[in-house]
Image (spheres, rainbow, N blue to C red):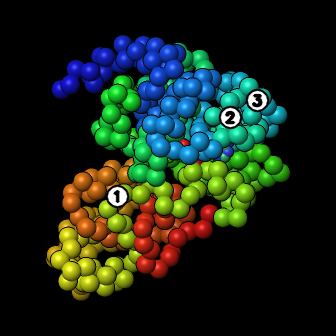
């Protein structure tokens, strides 16, 4: 085992991480959703390094990670009661709140908007790091812009060279596996901007109110990178649809001599259709496990030399909302659309 990744090294690694962050350097951090690429949110030059490393457009805001609700007022102002209510129920956890920013919050963090995204992650290593750090850590997902988000140490290492990213804290595989739910509390009604680790129903139950639908016409669309189409995508062509449509396409691709992976949801053993020439991967049957393994599966298959990945869409019931959202953005081609509208 690599000694720099053993649990006994954690305290020392957290100290190294604190020194790097205070010196304006980047550190890879584990969270319960995906790994983040962190910098001190109060140092614009450090935040700029995140954008350079990711190849991310400069007007895209990044989430500021904090230890808990007691730090909300350090970053946000005119904070509505709903923010404290949601924080009480879901923090530390996979929920990001969009609030009016404090004037000192740098444009490099907010993308020049008058709002800031705040989240207290639940992963014990990062929670400990944030408590000791005391400030906020700007951290988008630790992947190149547009690529699949990382859910393990090795994923992050494969995205950034050691010259760009000296230290990645190893927190194991992420529990949730897809990014946080983003709720905006700016404006008249709370809005769901991105489905994620906390379900819409759980948030609505706490608020006693429905979350307004986010539509594609929403003015923030261009500024919220997670809402762009063609995000979270593997490099290998990914095609989603139902089994029948995928089978028809597979026949054409096989005739062209292509190497096909099929990621199926239903059992296909007793199907009439012949999938013998495709490598078949059974995806998990429940939404939580599916979300947990989705990005790792896409990354694994991306390295396996397939010409195309065919993915059978899972059910459209509400617990699959976040998974469908990510599949919709990851797919290069969609055969039919049984996407769940937000
Ligand atoms: O689970 C997560 O949220 C992960 C982990 C690392 O915490 N982070 C993450 O960051 O997904 P990122 O940058 O890949 O996506 C964050 C989303 C982006 O789409 C960003 O545009 C949006 O949050 N966001 C951040 N601040 C915002 C703001 N002030 N207004 C609207 N959207 C904002
Ligand atoms: Mg991201």
Q: Nearer the viewer, residue 55 or 230?
A: 55
Residue 315 percent coordinates (x, y): 45, 70
Q: Nearer the viewer, residue 307 or 249?
A: 307
Residue 214 percent coordinates (x, y): 68, 60
- SS assignment at label 1: loop
**If you read the primary sequence from the N terminus, does the residue marked by circle 2 or circle 1 appear first?**
2
For the point 28% across and 24% down, the residue is 5
As drawn, the label of residue 279 is none
For the point 49% across and 65% down, the residue is 328
Q: Which residue is mark 3?
A: 102
Q: In this picture, is 271 found above or below 324?
A: below
Residue at disc 3, CB closer than 8 Å to ligand 1:
no
Query: In the picture, residue 312 is in which quadrant?
Result: bottom left
For the point 47% across and 80% down, the residue is 336
The residue mark sitting in front, 1 or 3, is: 1
- SS assignment at label 2: helix
**What is the CA distance from the residue labelled 3 to the residue labelled 2?**
11 Å
**If you read the primary sequence from the N terminus, does the residue marked by circle 3 or circle 2 appear first?**
3
Q: Which residue is mark 2?
A: 107
Residue 14 percent coordinates (x, y): 42, 17
Horizontally, residue 8 falls left or right of residue 30, namely: left
User: Which quadrant of the figure contains the C terminus?
Assistant: bottom right
As drawn, the label of residue 235 is 1
Horizontally, residue 227 falls left or right of residue 167, namely: right
């Amino acid at each position: 085992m690599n000694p720099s990744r053993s649990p006994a090294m954690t305290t020392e690694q957290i100290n190294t991480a604190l020194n790097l962050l205070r010196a304006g350097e980047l550190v890879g951090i584990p969270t319960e959703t995906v790994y983040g690429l962190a910098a001190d949110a109060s140092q614009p030059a450090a935040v700029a390094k995140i954008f350079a490393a990711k190849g991310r457009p400069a007007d895209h805001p990044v989430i500021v990670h904090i230890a808990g609700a007691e730090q909300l007022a350090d970053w946000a102002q005119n904070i509505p009661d709903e923010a404290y209510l949601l924080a009480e129920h879901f923090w530390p956890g996979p929920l990001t709140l969009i609030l009016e920013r404090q004037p000192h919050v740098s444009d490099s963090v907010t993308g020049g908007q008058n709002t800031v995204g705040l989240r207290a992650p639940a992963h014990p290593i990062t929670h400990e790091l944030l408590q000791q750090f005391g400030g906020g850590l700007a951290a988008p997902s630790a992947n190149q812009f547009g690529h699949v988000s990382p859910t393990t140490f090795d994923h992050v290492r494969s995205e950034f060279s050691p010259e760009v990213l000296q230290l990645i804290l190893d927190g194991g595989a992420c529990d949730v596996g897809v990014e946080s739910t983003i709720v905006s509390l700016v404006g008249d009604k709370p809005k769901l901007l991105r489905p994620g680790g906390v379900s819409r129903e759980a948030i609505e139950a706490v608020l006693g109110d429905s979350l307004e639908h986010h539509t594609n016409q929403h003015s923030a669309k261009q500024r919220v990178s997670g809402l762009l189409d063609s995000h979270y995508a593997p490099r290998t062509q990914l095609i989603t649809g139902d089994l029948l449509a995928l089978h028809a396409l597979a026949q054409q691709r096989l005739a062209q001599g292509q190497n096909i992976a099929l990621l199926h949801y239903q059992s296909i053993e007793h199907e009439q259709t012949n999938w013998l020439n495709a490598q078949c991967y059974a995806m998990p049957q429940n939404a939580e496990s599916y979300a947990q393994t989705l990005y790792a599966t896409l990354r694994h298959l991306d390295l396996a030399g397939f010409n195309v990945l065919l993915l059978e869409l899972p059910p459209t019931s509400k617990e699959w909302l976040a998974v469908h959202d990510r599949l919709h953005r990851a797919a290069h081609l969609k055969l039919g659309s049984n996407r769940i509208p937000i």
